[in-house]
Image (cartoon, helix red, strand yellow):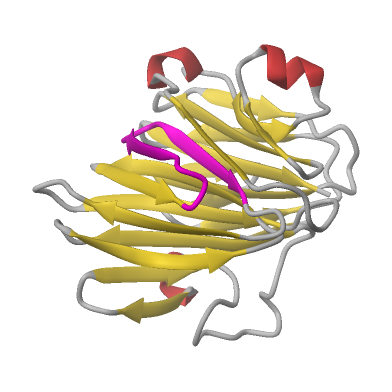
Amino acid sequence: MIELRPYETLGAANHGWLDARHHFSFAGYHDPARVHWGALRVWNDDRIAPKSGFPTHPHNDMEIITYVRTGAITHRDSMGNEGRTEAGDVQVMSAGRGVQHSEFNLEDEETTLFQIWIIPDERGGNPGWGARKFPKGDRAGAFVPLASSASNDDDAAAGALPIRTDARVLGATVKAGESVAYVPRDPSRHLYLVPATGRVKVEDVEAKARDGIAITQQDSITITALEDAELVLVDAA
């Protein structure tokens, strides 16, 4: 099954400083057909105005992955962590039994990002945070793991940030006319693909930038770039 979820059909909330689109039910947006996709619970497409952001607020029992598309986001949390994550790079926060954090765009330009929440395998535990640079050139023509289950030794060796859930978050860049393939370890896995930029074709389904593509019951998928494309893929239980 390959289901296209066009950008125009996503939930929307514009708070002035924040213009958000929700691939899944979130805050004031509820669609019973789009509550989650396997363990994938949230995929928000956020545009954050300069010198603004999310003030300190709590989270618990969620794996939160932030993929910065343009600009940068600055994170501070109750564990004492602070970091600035730039375009193309990734930060992860395991909320565990509870954590408070803030995220601000301290730049002079708009920041755009994907924020992805995945349900953890177990509740509780100590919270944690980490960030890493992922140069786009290193993922040209192939999916590279950005965040992955801490038990996935191959992804850990490749430099993926650890998350506490049976899932992988991957990125790739593909030139127009070229293709990239992905093979889940089991066809029952829940894949969710969003092109950050560019038009693509997943098998025979065409999608434009920031559309969502929900995929399951596939032995493998082939994504062909119709334009130069930057891809983000979640593979979840």
Report the residue at 31% width, 46% height from top. Answer: 73
Report the residue at 52% width, 84% height from top. Answer: 29
Furthest residue in direction left, as rendered: 108
Q: Quadrant of residue 143?
A: top right
Report the residue at 59% width, 71% height from top. Answer: 24
Q: Eyeballing the image, is 181 above or below 122?
A: above
Q: Is residue 139 visible?
A: yes
From the top left corner, tell me how far across and down residue 59 is, in percent: 58, 64
Q: How many marks?
A: 0
Q: Quadrant of residue 97?
A: bottom right
From the top left corner, tell me how far across and down residue 42 is, in percent: 59, 63
User: Is 187 situated left or right of 190 in this image?
Assistant: right
Residue 149 within the magenta-colored segment of the rendering? no
Report the residue at 37% width, 50% height from top. Answer: 113
Q: Nearer the viewer, residue 213 or 11?
A: 11
Q: Quadrant of residue 52?
A: bottom left
User: Is 55 situated left or right of 206 in this image?
Assistant: left
Q: Which residues are magenta?
A: 78-94
From the top left corner, tell me how far across and down residue 95 is, in percent: 63, 54
Q: Eyeballing the image, is 220 above or below 141?
A: below
Q: Is residue 198 visible?
A: no
From the top left corner, tell me how far across and down residue 145 is, in percent: 62, 26
Split into 4 quadrants, where in the image is the N terminus?
bottom right
User: Is 86 situated left or right of 206 in this image?
Assistant: left
Residue 87 within the magenta-colored segment of the rendering? yes
